Image (cartoon, rainbow, N blue to C red):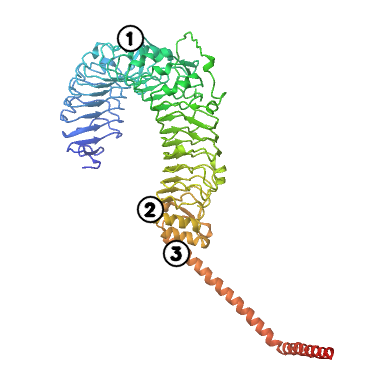
Amino acid sequence: MKEWKACQFASTCLCKNAPGSEHLIADCSEKDLLRIPRSPNNLQDLHLQNNNISTIEDGIFEGNSLLKSLDLSFNRISQIRKNSFKGLQNLLSLNLSNNDLKYENRSFEYSAFHFFENLKSLNLKRNVNTSFVPGLWKLRSLESLSIDYVADKIAILDEKFVYLKNLTIIDLSGFTGNCIMNILTKKTFLFLPQITHLNLSKCKIQHIFKGTFEILRNIFQLDVSLNTCLRFETLENITTDLQHSAVKILKVNNIHSIFGLPIQLKTSHIWNLKNTSLVKFEAAGNRIQTIESGTIQYLPESLKSANVSDNIFSLGKYVLDLKDLPITSLDISNNVSPPNVLTSYVEVCPLREETVTINSINNCFFNELPIFEMWKKFVFPVPRKLIKVFIRSTYLKYEIPNLSFSTNELKYVSLSDNVLHTWTGPITNGKKLTDLDLSTNFCSNISKKFFSPDFINLKYLLLQNNLLGFVLPTDVQGEIFQNLHNVVYINLSKNKITNIPNLLFKKQQNLERLDLSENMIEDINFKLSQMKKLRFLNLRNNRISMLSRYAMNELDSLAKMNANLTIDLGGNNLVYNCDSLSFVKWIVYTPTNLHHREEYECKISQNTISLLRNPREVYETIQKECMSYEGMIIGITTGILMFIFILCGGISYRYRWKLRYLYYMVKVKCINKNNSDIIDQRLIYK
């Protein structure tokens, strides 16, 4: 059984075989079940989430010793008794989240988890609203635990956890459950020194004292994000505790209130990280305005990725230290943008004295000093190992001037969703760059030298949602893209383009995908024959009514060399009539693949709109109509000419004697005149 079919033990459920096994997987979710159905003994996975189950009958799973995964989340279960899970000694994963297990000891009998000798993952989120933790002492194999924890003062995970020697992952996050842990001390995790993954995000933490995480020498990932009452100064306590740990990932996003004063990232905040093997660091949404000079050098050489988006960075001397960053990926998107106070998470924090000192030398705001202007005559410092950089939605409102980067490994750069309105350039020392995103920048002017020869390895160029339709038609010699020899994808959609010069893409021999959708193009009048690798041309939602003979020939010649060539003409106002008969014929017989051709809307005679489901039939119908009109025109023209000939003949016959008389009169006069001239000549001679 490879596909889902109705289960034999419950017709409302769906069953299928587990991959490479005769065991069953049963999906009974969202079936409005009031009780758990008895299932066969070869069941491996059972999904019962999103039902109305309120009780678990004793012994209901007694014959399911092969069951490995059980999901009972989003039900109304209020009690777990001693024999509720009898028979599930081989269960590996149990999800009881989002139930009604909120009555502490009444909801969990003392031996509620007695039979789970091999259980590795347990989820009890969104049940209790206190610091109560059920008896887990029997779960000696447990590796991952997701629970609620609500404590108004000091949070302590007590001796109940001392038996869980294999527990390495604890999820207490308020994102997925109920979590309040106001104060953390060195006693909080005293019985859990083996933890490797700890999620404390959105737990309304107000204080983390030094020594809290010192015992967690094996910690691999720590997340204390969205605890906005912590304030950024607490980072020093966290990094001090982690200096001798195995930490690889540290997340401290949004630990500073959106209404707090701007802060400075100081050396004391992170200098202890120098001794770690940290790989990923996140500090987004903390109102960081500047960085103390020399701080960056204390980041460990092992650091590969940094996310400091949603801050309010200003330009300062610390920019000169960027070249010392060991990272390969940097995200500083959404800089300067004010937070949305209506949708942002806001905590009520206790009052504290707040003082902030920021050296004015480091305080040049983006909107006061154009960031790129400073580097017109200098080399812009780039971290030597940086591969990816994201500077999206930062409201950069400048021209991109002549810019040269320091030696770098940059491959991916995203500057989308800014206001970089003019691209002057040239941009140099970007020889390893493969992906460039300049979309959504309101750019209406790009110079012919912006893309320097250093863009030799660029493969993906995203320029959509700009105003390049005002400048591209002027590039009749194709100089703007002439250095992009290896680009395989160009996106120029939504640029208000009306016309594309014939030679604009003359150097794009390796182009595979060209997106010109959502523009105002009326025909393909640019050269395509050099694009021998072109696979997809998107002209959707333009103003094309028919293609010219030149365009059809260009596409056909390409299709003969590349059988995978596809063009999308959907969303255009295609017109099928006698004037476009050759275009209709081309649609029928072209070797070019027409993307979703059956969805094309076409306007035929009598201005009716229809879908092009059978193009051959449409072509034959129009051909017949055009042929009948041709015969009618020939017949009418012939009739008119015959009528004129008959009319002229009748008139000539009616006045034949007068016409003969006039003819002879003219003839006689001509003869007499000739004779008179001869006599005059003789007299003169004599």
The numbered dot on residue 562 is: 2
Residue 544: x percent and y percent? 51, 52
Kindly identify which numbered label has been placed on residue 230.
none
CB within 8 Å, label 1 to label 3: no
- Sequence order check, earlier mark of 3 and 2: 2
Query: What residue sits 22% from the left and 13% below the top?
Result: 162
- The percent coordinates of residue 489 (x first, y second) are 43, 43
Question: Callout 1: 10 Å neighbours few (<14), some, many (20+)?
Answer: some
* In this view, 9 is above or below 282: below
Rendered-image quadrant of the C terminus: bottom right
Measured in 3D between alpha carbons, the distance from the residue under mark 1 to the one under mark 2, in whole angstroms, is 66 Å
Q: Give me the disc on residue 620.
A: 3
**Foreground: 370 or 238?**
370
510 horizontally vs 425: left or right: left
Tag 2 secondary structure: loop
Is any part of residue 229 visible from this angle? no
Which mark sits nearer the N-terminus, 1 or 3? 1
Check disc 3 and report its element: helix, strand or loop.
helix
Foreground: disc 1 or disc 3: 1
Left or right of residue 565: residue 377: right
Residue closest to the far front: 686
**Crowd around label 2: few <14 · some 14–19 · many ≥20 (10 Å):** some
Which element type, helix, strand or loop, lies under badge 1? loop
Q: Quadrant where the N terminus lies?
A: top left
Q: Give the label, 3 or 2, closer to the camera.
A: 2
The kind of residue tagged 3 is Glu
